[in-house]
């Protein structure tokens, strides 16, 4: 009877208020997350422990009653499933070992779903605990974003923010990068299929590093691999709606919405409201409150939520941030945002 609001919006409906969830809604801004995390010093092992990961997924649901839960996992589980060493350095973020041989990764790609079946167990545990009106989101990193981490490997310090190492590689060794993207398309399609089977209502593709690409690279590194991934996932039996998130590429977002093949398009903080409106004429949209405004709170937070509502609230829109919640966001500000949008 109660189709989750999130699904209704992805079907093109405009409910009385938009569904709400926040990227990185499970995380260090929650004291209960910090307590759980303290029991699991190894972040990857934490992601692959279904009981703990399900608990982390459900913590923000209990506290805030978001309209969707996103499975607690990480985009960097896929390199691990392809035989690359991945670990998290405390206070520094992810580190990856040397890139494995391409043929070895190709051989492992079809088994990526099975290799990450722990994430499926997390999804099943969460699905069983979730009220029927809440949606469960599974996800994966997009091929290019995951490739940037894989290619940086141990040299991750080179050109940190701009993914300069990986992008230089995309120009200098286009065939090698294309081969890696192909392997990631195959592995990720199987991984998404496994997540659907385990209970995900919706799947999201995180392209965190679509930012700053010239349009020819956007075509070959972002758009074409998304098309290939979505096509392959459908071939493998994925039928649930897919949200694409080409972060930092508002100027190309309309073309993306038309061509990528996803059911919804997530917009980032810097996407102009007017561009969002044009994208929304093509596909349901998600976004795009500034995570720093959620940190700041106060009258500016209310004002911007009103602006978003006015610009996008007349069409299919999922209220979210433009990027993940920061670890120092006050919990009160999350309540303030939920109240302002009418979800609390
Ligand atoms: O609540 C959720 O949104 C679900 C869980 C989730 C995590 N990572 C948990 C996590 C999701 C959807 C991701 C995606 C992810 N992971 C992305 C794409 C989205 C984005 O933020 O652009 C990327 C680029 C990663 C890779 C990654 N994982 C980095 C760069 C880091 C370190 C940065 C940091 O905040 O420490 C992580 C770690 C990570 N993934 C944490 C969480 C909650 C923090 C780990 C901790 O508890 O110490």
Image (cartoon, helix red, strand yellow):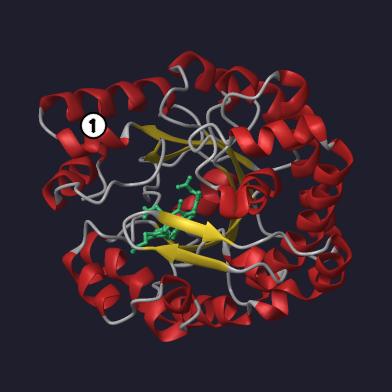
- Residue visible at 51% across and 22% down in the picture: 276
Q: Position of residue 233 (x, y in %)?
A: 78, 58
Callout 1: helix, strand or loop?
helix
Quadrant of residue 96 within the rendered picture: bottom right
- Residue visible at 57% across and 82% down in the picture: 118
- Residue visible at 19% across and 30% down in the picture: 301
- Position of residue 31 in the picture relative to residue 228 (left or right): left
- Position of residue 330 in the picture relative to residue 197 (left or right): left
- Position of residue 163 in the picture relative to residue 99 (left or right): left
Q: Position of residue 100 (x, y in %)?
A: 76, 64
Label 1 environment density (alpha carbons within 10 Å; few <14, some 14–19, many ≥20)? some
Q: Residue furthest top?
A: 274
- Position of residue 63 in the picture relative to residue 180 (left or right): left
Judging depth in this view, the residue of 12 and 229 nearest the camera is 229
Q: Total of numbered circles in the picture? A: 1
Residue highlighted by disc 1: 293
Q: Is residue 134 visible?
A: no
Q: Is residue 210 visible?
A: yes
Judging depth in this view, the residue of 166 and 69 nearest the camera is 166
State which image quarter holds ligand 1.
bottom left
Q: Position of residue 66 (x, y in %)?
A: 33, 57
- Residue visible at 76% across and 67% down in the picture: 190
Q: Is residue 309 above or below residue 84?
A: above
Judging depth in this view, the residue of 103 and 130 nearest the camera is 103
Judging depth in this view, the residue of 128 and 117 nearest the camera is 117
Q: Position of residue 81 (x, y in %)?
A: 68, 72
Quadrant of residue 111 within the rendered picture: bottom right
Disc 1 within 8 angstroms of ligand 1 (CB): no
């Amino acid at each position: 009877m109660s189709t989750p609001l999130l699904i209704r919006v992805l079907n093109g409906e405009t409910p009385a208020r938009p569904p709400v969830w926040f990227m990185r809604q499970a995380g260090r801004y929650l004291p209960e997350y910090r307590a759980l995390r303290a029991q699991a010093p190894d972040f990857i092992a934490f992601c692959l422990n279904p009981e703990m990961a399900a608990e982390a997924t459900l913590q923000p649901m209990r506290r805030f009653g978001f309209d969707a839960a996103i499975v607690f996992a990480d985009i960097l589980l896929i390199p691990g499933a392809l035989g690359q060493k991945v670990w998290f350095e405390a206070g520094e973020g992810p580190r990856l070992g040397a890139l494995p041989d391409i043929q070895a990764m190709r051989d492992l790609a079809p088994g990526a779903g099975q290799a990450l079946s722990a994430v499926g167990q997390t999804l099943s545990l969460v699905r069983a605990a979730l009220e029927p009106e809440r949606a469960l989101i599974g996800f994966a990193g997009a091929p290019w974003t995951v490739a940037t981490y894989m290619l940086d490997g141990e040299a991750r310090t080179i050109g940190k923010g701009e993914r300069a190492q990986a992008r230089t590689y995309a120009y200098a060794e286009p065939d090698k990068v294309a081969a890696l993207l192909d392997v990631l398309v195959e592995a990720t399609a199987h991984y998404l299929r496994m997540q659907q089977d385990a209970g995900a209502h919706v799947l999201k593709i995180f392209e965190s590093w679509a930012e700053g690409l010239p349009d020819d690279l956007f075509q070959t590194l972002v758009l074409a691999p998304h098309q290939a991934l979505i096509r392959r996932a459908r071939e493998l039996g994925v039928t649930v709606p897919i949200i694409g998130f080409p972060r930092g590429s508002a100027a190309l977002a309309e073309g993306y919405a038309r061509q990528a093949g996803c059911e919804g398009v997530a917009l980032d903080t810097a996407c102009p409201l007017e561009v969002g409106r044009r994208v929304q004429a093509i596909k349901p949209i998600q976004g795009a409150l500034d995570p720093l405004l959620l940190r700041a709170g106060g009258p500016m937070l209310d004002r911007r939520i009103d602006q978003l509502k006015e610009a996008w609230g007349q069409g299919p829109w999922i209220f979210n941030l433009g990027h993940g919640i920061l670890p120092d966001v006050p919990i009160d500000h999350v309540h303030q945002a939920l109240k302002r949008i009418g979800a609390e």
